[in-house]
Image: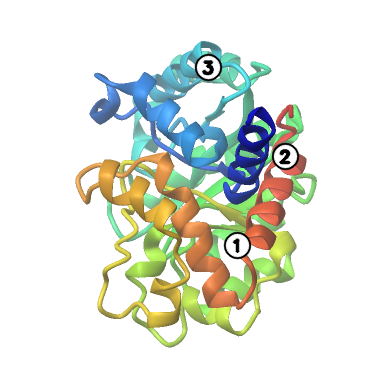
């Protein structure tokens, strides 16, 4: 009887996808009451490690704190999001605190930083100045750079070309066109994919990148962007073969614990299975490749 239990356990382990969430905003106040449960659910779902991005001095400090509360599971990044760029101009001394946070061992990347021209929370010139400061910091610390870019690709590429020493670059939560993706891929950048797959209705967007295998597996990372980007697997525009490619186990975690108001890292296996269906690959292949990319790129300890 014991042997039967062991084989069942092994089968269960084999069935569970092992994935790494390269971006979950667990510093968001929506998790303030039950973060332990959120992290435990993620691990139960097969999410082995979670990267928590800092998007301001305050949230970078909080992300670092979480990485110390959950060692080996949570890793932090230190970033000043384009929207928050003006805060550094208004309080220049806060940059020194930011640099100290960025130097911590648990902090595995600089960013998300970059340019966002869709919303004008900070002036473009201010965004550029703080973006360049973070590129220099990534070069100095020899850490990967996470990029947030919205309607600003030409300027982002112009700035990055002036800093050739920063080699490891990730375009977070990519939502652009195939043409834009190719420009990034030609430069050897990684692209992070989220549940936005369910929303993309264009003929030239992220779905095309997968269906036509334009995006190689060795340049792909997966992230939930929790609590945002809920992967709505019931979306009418989602092809039937993609819907049927999502396992009951992944749907159970997704529908029981995640909502449009609060997505969680435990939704990541469903996203991986959708990507696999679009690419006509097995979920295991996508899970293994994206986990390997994250471990290698960010130096996450196994």
Measuring 47% from the left and 70% from the top, which residue is drawn there?
Answer: 245
Q: Disc 3 on helix, strand or loop?
A: loop
Q: How many marks?
A: 3
Please indicate, yes or no, whether residue 179 appears anywhere in the rendered image: no
User: On screen, 30 above or below 241?
Assistant: above
Estimate the x, y position of residue 84 in percent, counting from the top left: 35, 36
> Is 161 displayed left or right of 273 in the figure?
right
- Snapshot quadrant of residue 108: top right
Q: CA distance from mark 1 to mark 2?
A: 18 Å
> Is 285 displayed left or right of 17 in the figure?
right
Measuring 70% from the left and 31% from the top, which residue is drawn there?
Answer: 300
| Quadrant occupied by the C terminus | top right
User: On screen, 28 above or below 285?
Assistant: above
Q: Nearer the viewer, residue 23 or 170?
A: 23
Q: Nearer the viewer, residue 230 or 266?
A: 266
> Is 296 displayed left or right of 262 in the figure?
right
Q: Disc 2 on helix, strand or loop?
A: helix
Q: CA distance from mark 1 to mark 3?
A: 27 Å
Q: Residues within 10 Å of mark 3 (few under 14, many from 20)?
A: some
Which one is earlier in the sequence, the residue at label 1 or at label 2?
1
Estimate the x, y position of residue 39 in percent, counting from the top left: 43, 27
Estimate the x, y position of residue 61 in percent, counting from the top left: 46, 17
> Is 87 displayed left or right of 130 in the figure?
left
Tell which residue pokes out farthest to the bottom in this image.
Answer: 203
For label 3, the residue is 70
Q: Nearer the viewer, mark 1 or mark 3?
A: 1
Residue 295 is labelled as 2
For label 1, the residue is 283
Residue 176 is labelled as none
């Amino acid at each position: 009887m014991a042997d039967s239990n062991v084989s069942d356990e092994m089968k269960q382990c084999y069935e569970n996808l092992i994935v790494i969430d390269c971006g979950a905003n667990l510093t968001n106040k929506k998790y303030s009451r039950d973060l332990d449960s959120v992290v435990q659910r993620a691990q139960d779902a097969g999410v082995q490690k979670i990267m928590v991005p800092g998007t301001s001095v305050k949230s970078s400090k909080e992300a670092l704190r979480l990485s110390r509360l959950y060692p080996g599971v949570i890793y932090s990044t230190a970033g000043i999001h384009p929207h928050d760029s003006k805060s550094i101009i208004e309080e220049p001394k806060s940059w020194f605190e930011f640099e100290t946070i960025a130097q911590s061992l648990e902090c595995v990347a600089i960013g998300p930083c970059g340019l966002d021209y869709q919303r004008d929370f900070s002036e473009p010139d201010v965004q550029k100045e703080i973006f360049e400061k973070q590129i220099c910091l990534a070069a100095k610390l020899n850490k990967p750079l996470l990029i947030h870019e919205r309607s600003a690709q030409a300027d982002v590429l112009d700035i990055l070309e002036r800093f050739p020493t920063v080699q490891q670059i990730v375009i977070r939560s990519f939502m652009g066109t195939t043409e834009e993706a190719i420009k990034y891929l030609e430069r050897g950048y990684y692209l992070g994919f989220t549940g936005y797959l369910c929303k993309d209705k264009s003929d030239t967007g992220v779905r095309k990148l997968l269906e036509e295998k334009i995006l190689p597996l060795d340049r792909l990372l997966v992230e939930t962007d929790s609590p945002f980007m809920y992967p709505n697997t019931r979306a009418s525009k989602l092809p039937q073969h993609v819907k049927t490619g999502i396992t009951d186990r992944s749907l159970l975690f997704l529908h029981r614990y995640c909502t449009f108001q609060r997505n969680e890292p435990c939704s990541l296996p469903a996203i991986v299975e959708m990507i696999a269906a679009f690419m006509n690959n097995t979920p295991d292949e996508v899970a293994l490749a994206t986990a390997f990319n994250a471990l290698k790129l960010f130096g996450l300890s196994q």
